[in-house]
Image: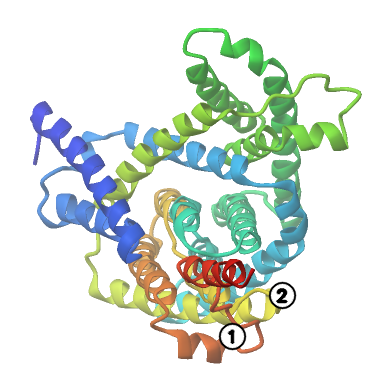
């Protein structure tokens, strides 16, 4: 186990360099950079025990929260009102149906295979139903899919994470025989959404109004980063979901000029969005944090019990199969088959699932394998998501994709940009020759 500070700093530098190398390889080979980073983390800690998670202590939890905050903010700024308008209904339907279908199947698996009590089975089912936003967002930014599909998947992942966190924590309280009813759970969910939206919209409008003045100060971008953390803290302190609040804040900042024209032309006299150098600043921060996070996620995976590992693999296959069916019948027919296939493949469990599984294990005790099984689900779902997204984009699975998603539009083969330069100049030359 490494205790040498110099060695630890060298490993951090090595991880950042590896992240850049894997990112460049992704652009050329389409092999997702997530998988090798996670595998590197697994070799560092669970396999060879080069680094121990005990070294991180409470800072590990702080680090994961900061990663989530930055990823949510970047996701919010990339959202466009036009995309949200076109994707809100489909994203909401996909969220509800996928949660219900996957949750029901995993509930039965947990109840019969793991012999868990009904309330514990329900908790595990919802934990597994969650799709990791921290994993999906970096993939969405690099995969070649339409803006509408990206908006649908972003909305689905965000809504799903907030719903699952609130409901699972309420169910844990119920399992501890506290006075919690379905009415209280619904009230908590609505309160979490509304309070986060209210605080974030106010903060977003306020910050956009004073952004020009902030830019005159030294280290202005650091002040914006600090304000993002303040928004998160304010939403969490109000009993809402801080990460969702940061998403809304980023959405307001990214669309403030449109919001001003549509709804606030008389109230908001000055509206400032981010400039290019500010976007680059946060993009660099996101890259560094998420690269380190994927290695940290790999270090956090302890797979020991063979039975729980096999149960996790079975549940992952079940989850992917159900999601393919749900995606096929909930997304509009005009969305292409490749987009549908990628949407079906992007359902990895991750940060939220790991945290909720650990919380359930700590607070309930005697949960008979929930945490071990969820870690197995995280491991296999990350591998399958990486592999599926690769083979789908490479069109290795085109016959299978066309068969499963036959009700959707075919992909347009003339889209690749490499074809157009060779085809278009020729007719122009012929016209000039004829004249």
Q: How many marks?
A: 2
Judging from the image, the colouring scheme is: rainbow
Q: Earlier in the sequence, mark 2 or mark 1?
A: 2
Residue at (16, 31) in percent of width and height:
9
Under circle 1, the secondary element is loop
Direction right: furthest residue: 266
Under circle 2, the secondary element is loop
Question: Would residue 306 be found to the left or right of residue 257 on screen?
Answer: left
The image quadrant of residue 25 is: bottom left
The image quadrant of residue 395 is: bottom left
Question: Would residue 302 be found to the left or right of residue 147 on screen?
Answer: left
188 in relation to 322, above or below: above
Quarter of the image that includes the C terminus: bottom right
Observer able to see residue 301: no
Task: Find residue 75 and report its horizontal and vertical position in percent.
Answer: 56, 45
Direction top: furthest residue: 217
Q: Label 2: which residue?
A: 332
For residue 150, the mark is none
Give 8 or 277, whichever is nearer the viewer.
277
The image quadrant of residue 175 is: bottom right
275 in relation to 289, above or below: above
In space, the residues marked 2 and 1 are separated at their CA atoms by 11 Å
Give 217 or 61, whichever is nearer the viewer.
217
Q: Label 1: which residue?
A: 405
């Amino acid at each position: 186990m490494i205790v040498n500070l110099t060695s630890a700093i060298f490993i951090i530098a090595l991880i950042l360099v590896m992240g850049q190398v894997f990112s460049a390889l992704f652009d050329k080979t389409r092999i997702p950079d997530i998988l090798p980073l996670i595998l590197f983390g697994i070799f560092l800690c669970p396999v060879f025990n080069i680094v121990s998670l005990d070294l991180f202590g409470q800072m590990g939890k702080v680090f994961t929260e900061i990663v989530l905050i930055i990823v949510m903010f970047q996701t919010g700024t990339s959202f466009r009102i036009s995309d949200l308008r076109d994707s809100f209904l489909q994203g909401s339907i996909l969220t509800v149906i996928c949660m219900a279908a996957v949750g029901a199947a995993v509930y039965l698996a947990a109840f019969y295979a793991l012999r868990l009590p009904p309330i514990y089975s329900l908790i595990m089912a919802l934990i597994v139903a969650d799709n990791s936003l921290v994993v999906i967002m970096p993939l969405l930014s690099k995969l070649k899919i339409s803006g509408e599909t990206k908006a649908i998947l972003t909305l689905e992942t965000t809504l799903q994470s907030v719903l699952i966190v609130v409901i699972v924590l309420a169910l844990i309280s119920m399992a501890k025989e506290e006075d919690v009813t379905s009415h209280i759970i619904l009230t908590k969910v609505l309160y979490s959404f509304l309070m986060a939206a209210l605080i974030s919209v106010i903060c977003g409008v306020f910050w956009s109004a004073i952004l020009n003045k902030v830019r005159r100060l030294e280290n202005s971008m650091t002040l914006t980063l600090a304000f993002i953390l303040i928004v998160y803290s304010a939403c969490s302190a109000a009993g809402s979901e801080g990460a969702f609040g940061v998403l809304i804040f980023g959405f307001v900042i990214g669309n403030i000029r449109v919001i001003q024209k549509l709804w606030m032309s008389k109230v908001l006299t000055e509206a400032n969005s981010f400039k290019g150098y500010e976007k680059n600043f946060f993009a660099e921060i996101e890259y560094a944090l998420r690269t380190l996070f994927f290695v940290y996620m790999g270090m956090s995976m302890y797979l020991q019990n063979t039975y729980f590992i096999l149960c996790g693999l079975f549940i992952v296959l079940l989850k992917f199969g159900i999601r393919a069916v749900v995606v096929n019948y909930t997304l509009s027919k005009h969305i292409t088959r490749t987009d549908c296939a990628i949407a079906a493949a992007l359902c990895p469990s991750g940060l939220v699932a790991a945290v909720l599984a650990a919380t359930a294990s700590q607070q309930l005790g005697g949960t008979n394998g929930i945490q071990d099984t969820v870690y197995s689900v995280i491991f296999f779902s990350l591998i399958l998501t990486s592999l599926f997204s690769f083979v789908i984009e490479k069109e290795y699975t085109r016959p299978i994709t066309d068969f499963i998603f036959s009700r959707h539009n075919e992909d347009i083969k003339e889209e690749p940009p490499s074809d157009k330069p060779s085809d278009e100049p020729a007719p122009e030359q012929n016209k000039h020759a004829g004249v």
